[in-house]
Amino acid sequence: MSFAKGEIKGVAFDLDGTLLDTETLYKRFWVEAAVRMGYPMRDEHALMIRATQAELAQQILREHVDPEFDFYGVRELRRVIMEEYVDEHGVEPKDGMYELLDALKARGVRMVVATATQPDRARKYLRMVKADHYFDEIICASMVPHGKPAPDIYLLAAERMGLRPDQALAVEDAPSGIRSAHAAGMHRVLIPDQDEPGEELRALCEYVLPSLRDLIDMI
């Protein structure tokens, strides 16, 4: 399945690592919080759980880091120390974000955010980069029974845009997000952030692009 120019009626954007350059912060502070609590977590472990629902993320970390990994305790500490950093230093948009959002808005394409981040923090981050006004709605994992890679969040995103999934596009940076969108029947574009996709993930994507800017003339 692939899409032609003008076919896409709505776009659901992942937030962290896709619109905002925040995945580096999540990776940094997951590791820092885990180490503070005595777990030998490394960068590659943080990448394994990007945008992944809590139960699955806990399972992954208990398998790869420590059988007794306190996922919820580490996550809460990560939230605290990351927010302290963000409040002082802010967040940055990904390359081409404003150009793409301006182009889609001008064409009347519906836009929502579909993220694992809680609604208040998602809105806060978007306000920081003056991008909150572009989106009709913020769809968060807390609004659905199962987070990514389950299809729930993208099915809800399509519903809230008033579209069938095959009329909408998901823009993602992470494997769990692509798997979620694929399961929902949405069109899919991957813009890699922290690592390059393997063959299995590429097979689930319609396009793999260097930046958001490269998507402007495709929709």
Image (cartoon, rainbow, N blue to C red):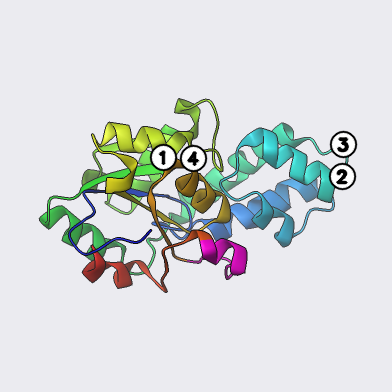
Q: Nearer the viewer, residue 41 or 204?
A: 204
Disc 3 versus disc 1: nearer the observer: 1
Name the N-terminal-most of marks 4 and 1: 4
Q: Which residue position holds label 4? A: 117
Marks 3/1: CA–CA distance: 32 Å
Q: Which residue position holds label 1? A: 154
Marks 2/3: CA–CA distance: 5 Å
Q: Mark 1 touching mark 2, by CB under 8 A?
A: no
Q: Residue at x 27, y 51 (%)?
A: 131
Tell me if 169 is positioned left or right of 82 in this view: left
Kind of residue indicated by mark 4: Thr
Residue 118 covered by magenta stretch: no
Q: Which residue position holds label 3? A: 68
Q: Residue at x 44, y 41 (%)?
A: 184
Kind of residue indicated by mark 2: Asp
Name the N-terminal-most of marks 2 and 4: 2
Number of residues whose C-alpha sits closer than 10 Å to that of mark 2, classed few (under 14), some (14–19) or many (20 or more): some
Residue 198 covered by magenta stretch: yes
Marks 1/2: CA–CA distance: 32 Å
**Highlighted magenta segment, given as a residue range:** 192-203
Query: What is the secondary structure assignment of the residue under circle 3?
Result: loop
Tell me if 177 is positioned left or right of 69 in this view: left
Marks 4/1: CA–CA distance: 14 Å
Disc 1 versus disc 2: nearer the observer: 1
Query: What is the secondary structure assignment of the residue under circle 1?
Result: helix
Q: Nearer the viewer, residue 181 or 45?
A: 181
Name the N-terminal-most of marks 3 and 1: 3
Residue farthest to the front, as pictured: 1
Q: Mark 4 touching mark 3, by CB under 8 A?
A: no
